[in-house]
Image (cartoon, helix red, strand yellow):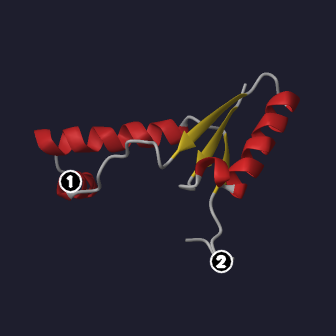
Amino acid sequence: MSKLLHIQSSPRGERSASITVARQFAESYSAAHLEDTVETFDLWDAVLPEFDGAVLDAKYAILNGQPHTAAQLEAWTAVVKLCDHFKSADKYVISLPMWNFSIP
């Protein structure tokens, strides 16, 4: 059993051609792979951790082999949770907008 993660990155929602195409692909994929799961992750609706000073300090603490402070640990835990969510998928579909024939 595999997990397909569809990452939506267009703010246009239902008006987005890339989301429409990716959604159709996901539906076809689900029909062809009944044992697999498909999950959608909308970057515009998600609550993402801020990459602020505490997260940056936590990252550098890891790189320098230093222990985290309580604030760093709290900030880093949110980042790890998000990373684990992405790493839990086996396959990815990324639908991103094209504005004026370019990626924003």
Rendering coords of residue 77 (x, y %): 29, 38
Residue drawn where x is 72% and y is 56% of the image? 17
- The three-letter amino acid code for the residue at tag 2 is Asn
Rendering coords of residue 10 (x, y %): 57, 56
Which of the 4 image quarters holds residue 96?
bottom right
Q: Are marks 1 and 2 in contact (CB under 8 Å)?
A: no
Residue drawn where x is 47% and y is 49% of the image? 44
Which of the 4 image quarters holds residue 72?
top left
* Mark 2: secondary structure: loop
Residue drawn where x is 71% and y is 30% of the image? 2
* Mark 1: secondary structure: helix
Q: Which mark is residue 61?
A: 1
Please tell me which residue lies in front, 71 or 62: 71
Residue picked out by circle 2: 100
Residue drawn where x is 68% and y is 50% of the image? 19
Task: Using the rendered image of the protein, determine whether residue 68 is visible from the camera's viewpoint.
Answer: no
